[in-house]
Amino acid sequence: MTDAIEIRTVDRFAEPAFTALVDRLLHDSDRKAVNERLFGSQVVAPPPSQALQVRVGAYAGDTLVGWSHAFLAPGGVLYVSNSAVDHEYRRQGVYTRLVAAIEEEAKALHCLRVESHHRAANSAVLIAKLKAGYTIVGTEFQAEMGLLVKMAKPLDARRGAVFHARAGVLEGAVRFFEPTRNPALTGP
């Protein structure tokens, strides 16, 4: 079924189908009820961002079945603000392909790394991101979202070597910086 999925970058996702998909996949009824009880039924939309937006969609024919939405943040970061894959298309590599497409977009924009936050209980996404080479770099608590795990992936091999050593991912970091042990350090 994944062969039939096309991953492509778009300027905008088609409405109202995109909003309906976001509501179905990200806005569970429990969260809606709590937000409405605490904040009322009026939703105040945040002001539109002036940051460069990147939207990558997974399409089954003309139907959007998954997406990743990111924006260019200060410091050479492409920040992935939200992603999801329709239940019917999960566990088929669609999310992994979206992650790879976002990384390619980040490289094309000359970004240094990709960052994202995920709910701590979302083990499927956390595992997929760890398998794709992301590192957990912290946690944050937001009243609206709960406990979030921050993840990052450097896009340049040399910066990645420094990142992993400083993040404590590697034992014996000093010897890791010897070019004979780490060929990534000898690149341009």
Image: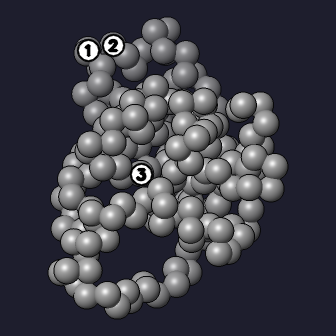
The reply to whether residue 19 is in sight is yes
Of circles 2 and 1, the one toward us is 1
Q: Position of residue 164 (x, y in %)?
A: 36, 29
Q: Which mark is residue 116?
A: 3
Q: Is residue 118 left or right of residue 58?
A: left
Residue 79 position, x and y percent, is 48, 57
- Counting from the top left corner in percent of width and height, residue 110 is at 63, 52
Residue receiving disc 1: 172
Measured Cα–Cα span from mark 1 to mark 3: 28 Å
Residue for badge 2: 175
Secondary structure, mark 2, is helix
Residue sitting at x 33%, y 42%: 122
**Residue 50 figure quarter:** bottom right
Badge 2 vs badge 1, beta-carbon distance below 8 Å = yes
- Tell me the kind of residue under disc 3: Ser
Q: Nearer the viewer, residue 5 or 151?
A: 5
Q: Residue at x 72, y 31 (%)?
A: 1
